Image (cartoon, rainbow, N blue to C red):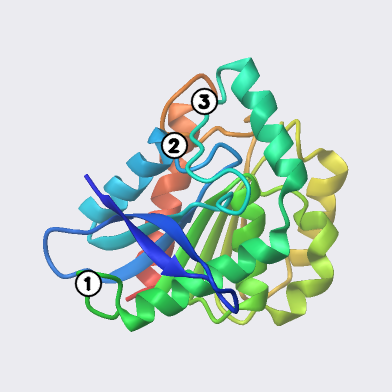
Amino acid sequence: MGDYVKIDALNEDALFPAYVAAPSDNARAAIIVIPEIFGVNAGIRQKCDLLAAAGYLAVAPDIFWRFAPGVELNPDIDAELQEAFGYFGQYDADDGVRDIEAVIHAIRKGLPGQGPLEKVGCVGYCLGGRLAYMAAARTDINASVGYYGVMIDQMLNESHAITHPLMLHIPTADHFVGPEAQAAIHAGLRDHPKVTLHDYAGLDHGFAAEMGNRRNAEGAELADARTAAFFAAHLA
């Protein structure tokens, strides 16, 4: 089980919360877990706890802190799904990547009760997958992973700035990221020396959720094993 800490916003006189799960021994590195549009809910906290059990300091920032602080939503409940879509419509991803940079700085300085860690990765889901791509292009994060990231096809002009390893998991039946967007991502990134792409035939958006109706256990286990190996290689 983890706890919440406050992090200084970047170039703002504000603090925002983040859920932190720490390993029982010294952390090998830190991984920022960037939520979907459902906030730091039970599934995201579980992902942090699993990363902590694997030896990482896991930090999940509240990405909606500016207008819906502390929100936790269940994608299997339609009213909460629609609420999440509303928050997505309000969200400024440029603010989001600055928040990720603030978390990177805080980790490298040392979070409360933790020593400083130089190696920092991130893993994001849905909107968080887009932010993982943006973090790879706009920050000095050491390694990034995005699951079913949305709107990456609209940001391929930033790919030249990616200087650290990036892995993207792409379900081919994603009803939010259609075939044309997937084709654009492959065309724009497949030859990039720092980018690795994995397709998951027939799987849909949210297939790697920790819990709920969207999860596909076989696909999630495969993707998560690839993510674990990626971080082991690049955060050592």
Q: Is residue 35 left or right of residue 182?
A: left
Query: In whole angstroms, how far apart are the C-alphas of marks 3 and 2?
Result: 8 Å
Where residue 128 appears, x then y in whole percent?
59, 52
Res 152 quadrant in image = bottom right
Residue kind at label 3, given as amino acid type: Asn
Residue that appears at 28% across and 47% down: 49
Residue that appears at 73% across and 70% down: 191
The disc label shown at residue 20, or none:
none
Assign a secondary structure to mark 2.
loop
Query: In whole angstroms, how far apart are the C-alphas of marks 2 and 1?
Result: 23 Å
Task: Say which residue label 3 marks.
Answer: 74
Quick one: label 2 or label 1, which is nearer the N terminus? Answer: 2
Residue kind at label 1, given as amino acid type: Gln
Assign a secondary structure to mark 3.
loop
Where residue 34 appears, x then y in whole percent?
51, 53
Q: Is residue 26 visible?
A: yes
Q: Quadrant of the N terminus?
A: top left
Where residue 79 appears, x then y in whole percent?
64, 18
Q: Is residue 69 left or right of residue 87?
A: left
Query: In whole angstroms, how far apart are the C-alphas of marks 1 and 3?
Result: 31 Å
Q: Is residue 29 left or right of residue 196?
A: left
Assign a secondary structure to mark 1.
loop
The vertical placement of 235 against 41, above or below, is below
Q: Quadrant of the C terminus?
A: bottom left
The disc label shown at residue 114, or none:
1
Foreground residue among 220 and 110:
110
